[in-house]
Image (spheres, grey):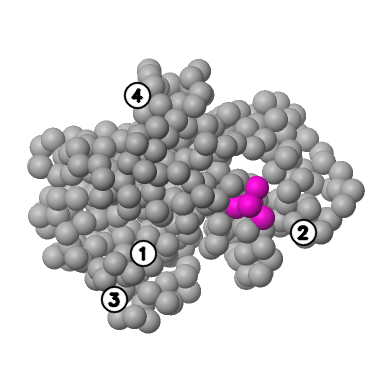
């Protein structure tokens, strides 16, 4: 199989590339490297079964050219800076909505009929049902990022209807683990390296979030692709556990060997405008096809901290959320 992975030099994308290569696929990694890193792909590229193309999804000619002969697209290229949408209101529209439309058009022209899309739990806004199932609604948006992901899902579903495509759109909780380079754990490690006596925590520290280790996430994606055959799939992929931000901070401090760190809270039930105080997804559909997370959240946090400390180059390079 030939597969094209947009955003394949990113945290999750590079793990998908590795898994595809392990499955003997020929992989085109399509990434503008604005937040991704080519060094993540060294092992897969060295096999001769993966090739990195440095280009943007909005470069239509390049995208159509590289799409030729592909049987499946994994679309991960996107802006992921949830907080930044308030200050840069076009970025989610350009990268997440128009970028997804460009990918779908290239697929239509190239005759590719299968797409895997990485959506987000942020599409639910602030739901009133927990754990939140895929059929929850009406969905009321609280961020431009969440709105853009939901719009991208809708575009994918329409193209499936019009052009006979098949899709798997995964609504993720936050992923953690090896190659992680953005998000709350990254921020805490970086802050604590700068000042090991005090840690600023956004909000009141009671925000409760679910986190999924990348090993479990990759296993879940490919299990769903194999087991869920409906033309248009929308799938929650998360963990049955959750952890509040203060407890997560304590785990990070402990793993870094830091005692007596003073926590300074900025206040409010949200870390920032558009943040959800509780993220906990219903993963019953995934469990029905045999999925169950194997890495507990605390273990995943500790492994992420160890990875960041062992790879200080990441802490010197900001990859946005």
> Residue 135: horizontal and vertical position, in percent?
34, 24
> Residue 58: horizontal and vertical position, in percent?
29, 55
Tell me which numbered mark, 2 or 4, is placed earlier along the sequence.
4
Is disc 1 surrounded by few (<14), some (14 to 19) or many (20+) residues within 10 Å?
A: some
Tell me which numbered mark, 3 or 4, is placed earlier along the sequence.
3
> The N terminus appears in which quarter of the rendering?
bottom left
Tell me which numbered mark, 2 or 3, is placed earlier along the sequence.
3
Q: Is residue 199 above or below residue 13?
A: above
**Which one is closest to the eye, mark 1 or mark 3?**
1
Prevailing SS of the magenta stretch: helix
Please tell me the numbered disc located at residue 49.
3
- Badge 1 is on which residue? 19
As helix, strand or loop, the secondary structure at mark 4 comes to loop
Please tell me the numbered disc located at residue 153.
none
Marks 3 and 4, how far apart at CA: 39 Å
Tell me which numbered mark, 2 or 1, is placed earlier along the sequence.
1
Marks 1 and 3, how far apart at CA: 11 Å
Please give the name of the residue rendered at 64% of the width and 37% of the height, measured from the top-left corner.
243
Tell me which numbered mark, 1 or 3, is placed earlier along the sequence.
1
Please give the name of the residue rendered at 37% of the width and 81% of the height, measured from the top-left corner.
46
Marks 2 and 4, how far apart at CA: 40 Å
Please tell me the numbered disc located at residue 135.
4
Which region is colored magenta?
Answer: 298-302
As helix, strand or loop, the secondary structure at mark 3 comes to loop
Marks 4 and 1, how far apart at CA: 30 Å
């Amino acid at each position: 199989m030939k597969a094209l992975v947009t955003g394949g030099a990113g945290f999750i994308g590079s793990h998908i590339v590795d898994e595809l290569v392990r499955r003997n696929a020929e992989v085109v990694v399509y990434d503008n490297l604005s937040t991704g890193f080519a060094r993540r792909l060294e092992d897969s590229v060295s096999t001769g079964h993966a090739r990195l193309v440095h280009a943007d999804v909005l470069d239509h000619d390049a995208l159509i050219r590289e799409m030729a002969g592909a049987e499946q697209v994994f679309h991960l290229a996107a802006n992921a800076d949830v907080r930044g949408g308030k200050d840069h209101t076009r970025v989610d529209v350009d990268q997440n909505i128009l970028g997804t439309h460009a990918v779908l058009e290239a697929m239509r022209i190239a005759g590719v009929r299968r797409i895997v899309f990485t959506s987000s739990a942020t599409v639910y806004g602030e739901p009133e049902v927990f754990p939140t199932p895929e059929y929850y609604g009406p969905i009321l948006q609280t961020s431009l990022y969440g709105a853009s992901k939901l719009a991208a899902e809708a575009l994918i579903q329409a193209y499936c209807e019009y052009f006979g495509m098949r899709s798997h759109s995964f609504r993720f909780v936050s992923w953690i683990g090896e190659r992680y380079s953005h998000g709350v754990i990254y921020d805490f490690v970086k802050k604590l390296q700068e000042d090991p006596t005090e840690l600023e925590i956004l909000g009141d520290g009671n925000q409760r979030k679910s986190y999924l280790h990348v090993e479990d996430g990759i296993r879940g994606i490919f299990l769903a692709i194999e087991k869920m055959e409906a033309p248009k799939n929308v799938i929650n992929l998360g963990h049955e556990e959750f952890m509040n931000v203060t407890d997560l901070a304590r785990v990070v401090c402990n793993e870094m060997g830091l005692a007596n760190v003073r926590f300074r809270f900025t206040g409010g039930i949200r870390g920032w405008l558009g943040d959800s105080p509780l993220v906990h997804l219903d993963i019953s559909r995934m469990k029905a096809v045999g999925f169950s997370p194997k890495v507990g959240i605390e273990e995943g946090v500790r492994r992420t901290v160890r990875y960041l400390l062992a790879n200080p180059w990441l802490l010197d390079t900001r990859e946005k959320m």
